[in-house]
């Protein structure tokens, strides 16, 4: 099978390339910067299609020609979530592709309304438009927070305390809203890529669907304890207030902010939707997809810089 990966020049994209190829399939990449892919990984590609932008339609048509499946690994920029994905979806339609994995790798946004989580509005709008207008039934993978993002690993998005997340990497402490016993679904990038490969290569991938997966369902108290055991470093828990107090802060920040500058406050909403249970995934598809999840201990040992 030949799989096209769009937006494959980020850390998750690299892992997606490796996961597909490790299963004996071919990978084609469409992106702007081929130099971001290591020489070793690049030579393993079936081909690389250089695009000038996310709306380079000739490049996307060229990239989709002859492929069996498309994986969208665009980042969280609103214009990529909606505009970029729709343009890619239309190119896949023109090429007769039936297997499509949408950019998700996030919290379970089903049931949310526009405006509840500004950074998910693009996901919601794309999902609705695809269901109403496309011959393709996309797949979506809900992972909770990516482990590398949660712990502010190098070369990833930063959900540290600087952006109202829980982890302070400099001082090895968690800022806790709520009791600290609330469940955090998290998935490391390696596992996310493995889940994605399993989804897109399934015999029934053309039917589309929503997949809930997770490397771990740990509370912040549990994470702190595991970190201490693995690193031999004490982790402090700073309790900041209740979940409702966090919600009030988030709403006030949005009220006094701008949607065009949502990254200035959106971290509070990420935190709130997690600890309020809004994104709690009751049933996981790990076993159905046949992926052995990476426990936090192993994740930390594999990432000594965290």
Image (cartoon, rainbow, N blue to C red):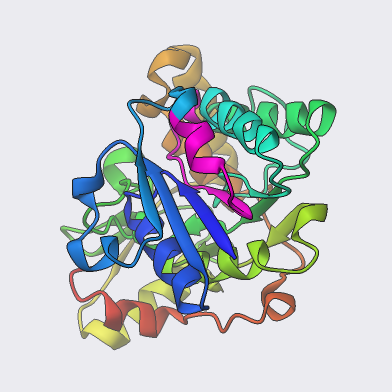
Foreground: 75 or 306?
Answer: 75
Q: Is 73 contained in the magenta span?
A: yes
Task: Tell me where the magenta segment starts and ends, as one range.
Answer: 59-80
* Residue in the image at 74% along x and 54% along y: 210
* Residue in the image at 78% along x and 52% along y: 208
Foreground: 109 or 219?
Answer: 109
Residue 294 located left or right of residue 125: left
Q: Position of residue 48 (x, y in %)?
A: 35, 48
Foreground: 159 or 164?
Answer: 159
Q: How many marks?
A: 0
Residue 84 located left or right of residue 97: left
Quarter of the image with the N terminus in it = bottom right
**Is residue 257 at all visible to an observer of this figure?**
no
Q: Position of residue 42 (x, y in %)?
A: 27, 60
Quarter of the image with the C terminus in it = bottom left
Q: Quadrant of residue 230?
A: bottom left
* Residue in the image at 42% along x and 14% along y: 260
Q: Is 61 contained in the magenta span?
A: yes
Residue 135 located left or right of residue 143: right
**Is residue 252 at all visible to an observer of this figure?**
yes
Q: Position of residue 219 (x, y in %)?
A: 52, 68
Q: Position of residue 156 (x, y in %)?
A: 30, 51
């Amino acid at each position: 099978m030949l799989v096209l990966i769009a937006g494959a020049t980020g850390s998750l994209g690299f892992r997606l390339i490796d996961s597909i190829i490790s299963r004996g399939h071919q990978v084609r990449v469409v992106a702007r910067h081929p130099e971001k892919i290591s020489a070793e990984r690049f030579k393993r590609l079936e081909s690389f299609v250089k695009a000038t932008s996310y709306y380079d339609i000739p490049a996307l048509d060229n990239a989709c020609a002859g492929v069996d499946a498309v994986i969208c690994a665009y980042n969280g920029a609103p214009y990529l979530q909606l505009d970029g994905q729709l343009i890619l979806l239309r190119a896949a339609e023109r090429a007769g592709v039936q297997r499509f994995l949408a950019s998700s790798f996030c919290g379970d946004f089903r049931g949310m309304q526009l405006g509840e989580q500004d950074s998910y509005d693009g996901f919601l709008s794309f999902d609705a438009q695809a269901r109403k207008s496309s011959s393709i039934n996309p797949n979506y993978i809900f992972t909770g927070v990516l482990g590398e993002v949660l712990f502010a690993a190098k070369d990833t998005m930063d959900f540290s305390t600087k952006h109202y997340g829980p982890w302070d990497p400099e001082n090895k402490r968690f800022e806790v809203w709520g009791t600290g016993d609330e469940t955090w679904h998290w998935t490391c990038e390696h596992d996310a890529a493995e889940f994605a490969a399993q989804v897109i290569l399934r015999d029934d991938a053309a039917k589309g669907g929503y997949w809930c997966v997770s490397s771990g369902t740990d509370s912040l108290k549990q994470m702190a304890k595991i970190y201490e055991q693995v690193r031999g470093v004490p982790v402090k828990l700073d309790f900041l207030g209740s979940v409702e107090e966090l919600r009030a802060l988030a709403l006030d920040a949005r009220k006094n902010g701008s949607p065009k500058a949502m990254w200035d406050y959106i971290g509070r909403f990420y935190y709130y939707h997690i600890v309020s249970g809004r994104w709690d995934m009751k049933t996981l598809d790990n076993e159905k997809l046949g992926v052995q999840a990476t426990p936090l201990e192993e994740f930390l040992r594999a990432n000594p810089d965290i």
